[in-house]
Image (cartoon, grey):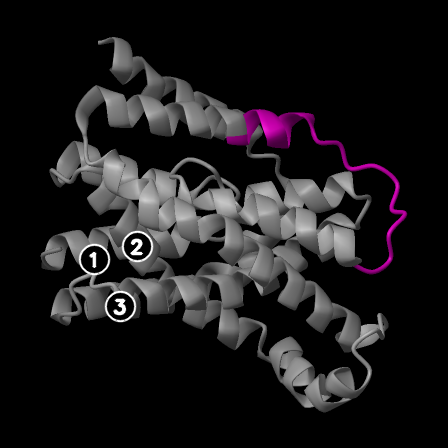
Amino acid sequence: MDFLEAVVLAVVQGLTEWLPISSEGVASLLMLNFFGKSLTEAIYISAWLHTGTLLAAIVYFWGDIKAILKNLPNYVRNPNETEGYSGLTRFLLVSTITTVIIAAPIVFFMLESFNFSGGAAMGLIGLLLIITGLLQKFVKRSAVISERPGFLDALIAGGVQAFAVFPGLSRSGLTTSALLLRKHDPEFALKLSFLMSIPAVLIAEIGLILTHRIAFDVFSLTAIGVSFLLGLLTLSSLLRIAERVNFGYFCIFLGMLSLSAFFI
């Protein structure tokens, strides 16, 4: 990235991460159309942009994170406990492990083959955006039955989160929809979605650095700083919007627009 790319993409990340519209998909479309990146390059840069919003999420959810860390000794002594923060700890552990097991082979063996751009890349992102939109459109907010996340909830949510490495599949959209299908409260489902993103994204960023898939320079640091500041400023308000607005139609429209590039 150069300075302009870093700032523009960081602004997009800071604004779209909290909405179920695939910030990675939107950023990748920008990079394909205006910054001359291949789809593989766009995916890695999009993943790196999540570092800033990861830090913003840590600040915003620090009360819960602090309580989880404080409760860890109790969880270690009573790993089968499902109440309170022990249950939340188990959910985060299981969902994170599930995500890593599924996502790691995708990242290391599939994404390198996405080294193409143009209509094919646009079409792929468009198709995945349409899938994201249809999922949100048809998942109904039904009566709440589950009061706390269980083991199966963690497996399902962690599994679908792994596929968000593909641009166009919204991580929050997939995980929140999965938890809604499991009869969780919408507000609680959204909170769980972002809490489970913290360890998963942290592991992903460490992987990007260790495998040299991102240039660790002043421009990548600029992107982190801008996305962090903007993400922190917009997180609360955009989460409230995400709770109330169904973004399915937006994803479908953007997806159809992108998919049309494949046929032009």
- Segment tinted magenta in the rendering: 132-149
Mark 2 lies on a secondary structure that is helix
Mark 1 lies on a secondary structure that is helix
Residue visible at 65% across and 49% down in the picture: 157
Visible in this render: residue 230? no
Q: Hey, what amino acid is under mark 2?
A: Val
Residue visible at 67% across and 80% down in the picture: 68
Q: Is residue 34 above or below residue 121?
A: below
Total marks in image = 3
Q: Residues within 10 Å of mark 2 (few under 14, many from 20)?
A: many
Q: Is residue 245 above or below residue 158?
A: above
**Whole-number angstrom distance, CA of label 1 to CA of label 2:** 6 Å
Q: Which corner quadrant holds the C terminus?
A: top left
Residue under pointer 1: 7
Does the magenta stretch mainly form a helix, a strand or a loop? loop
Residue visible at 20% across and 65% down in the picture: 220
Residue under pointer 3: 209
